[in-house]
Amino acid sequence: MFAFLLFILSIVSSTYIDVISKCSCEQLLVESDCDVINSCFWDEKKCINIEDCQFDSPVFCPEDIKCAYLEGKCTKFTSCDLYLGDKSLCEAISIQCTSIDGKKCQKKQIPSCSLYDESICNDSYGFEGECGFFESKCQVIKQCSDIDLIKEEFQFMKCSIQNSHSCQITSSQKCVQKKCQDLPDKSRCKSVYEYDTFDNPQKVQLCKWEDGVCDDALPKDLDEFTCFTNTKFSYQWNPEIKSCQKCDQPQPDPPSPNNFGFIMKVAIMIYLISY
């Protein structure tokens, strides 16, 4: 029964928020939020969207799938097949391109994790995401605990470095989902990611620094300096009502910890009835 209650506790105390939908430039109401995004520009009293592919950066331009970096300029992407160059040049034109023959570009073809053999599996990505060799085959890693099953020499790199936003190694050398309470200082107490195989989270647990410790937070706990960035650009600060709000549509906050007692009573009743 104790294990069951711990499981229920982990569910009801979770306050992960959805960060799939991002704010558009036009939805941002304060200049500081607008300035964070390269494709946004603060025009006197409002945030506007800069026309696609207007930032002539050899770093940012190729990373935007709508753009291609050609002859020192950022232009609209058309097709990898229309560009010429070796592997390094093609990949500098667009993140979508590479070259096999060293003469012309072609679209990158990413295989499934299942097609990699053991020798390269743990250093590879498939179209499904990050790969790991465990249970005698190469497969996609779906959660922090999967990393425990791969060869020991890869565990620290994958758990503590490649997935440091979501995973951590415990004192018993287990790879587990990171929590706000694991963040040691105020500068890092912002959010933790729910594990995502591309390290591009769909959900995050917000954090706040309070009484010398990092603890779970809700959007309502954030201020004008932390709302936009800590929510991975999915919430924006509304200066009129001084509140952190989701951009796509108004939604209530996740259940408050104040409901914990009631939820626990229901969980115990369900357990007793089932047994």
Image (cartoon, helix red, strand yellow):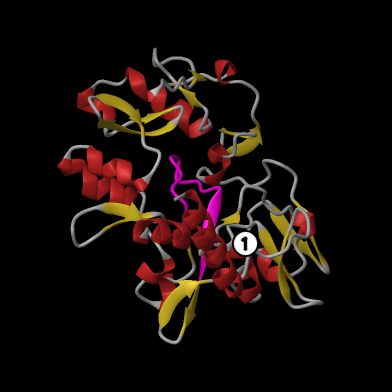
Whether residue 14 is visible here, answered yes or no, is: no
Identify the element where label 1 is drawn. Answer: loop
Q: Is residue 110 left or right of residue 77?
A: left
Q: Is residue 258 left or right of residue 133?
A: right
Residue at 42% from the left image edge and 70% from the top image edge:
188
Where residue 171 sits, quadrant-wise, is bottom left
**Most foreground residue, 4 or 241:** 4
Compared to residue 226, the image places residue 27 above or below, namely: above
197 magenta-colored: yes
Whether residue 187 is visible here, answered yes or no, is: yes
Residue at 27% from the left image edge and 28% from the top image edge:
121
Bounds of the magenta segment: 192-207
Instruction: Please state the horizontal and vertical placement of residue 91, each as a whole percent of the image.
Output: 46, 30
Instruction: Please state the horizontal and vertical placement of residue 4, each as a whole percent of the image.
Output: 40, 56
Compared to residue 130, the image places residue 217 above or below, namely: below
The amino acid type of the residue labelled 1 equals Val
Q: Quadrant of the N terminus?
A: bottom left
Q: Which residue is mark 1?
A: 36
Compared to residue 59, the image places residue 167 above or below, namely: below
Picture mark count: 1
Residue at 24% from the left image edge and 44% from the top image edge:
148
Instruction: Please state the horizontal and vertical placement of residue 61, each as a whole percent of the image.
Output: 57, 41
Residue extending furthest toward the top: 101
**Most foreground residue, 267 or 273:** 273
Instruction: Please state the horizontal and vertical placement of residue 133, each as a whole percent of the image.
Output: 26, 30
Where residue 67 sits, quadrant-wise, is top right
Q: Is residue 173 left or right of residue 68?
A: left
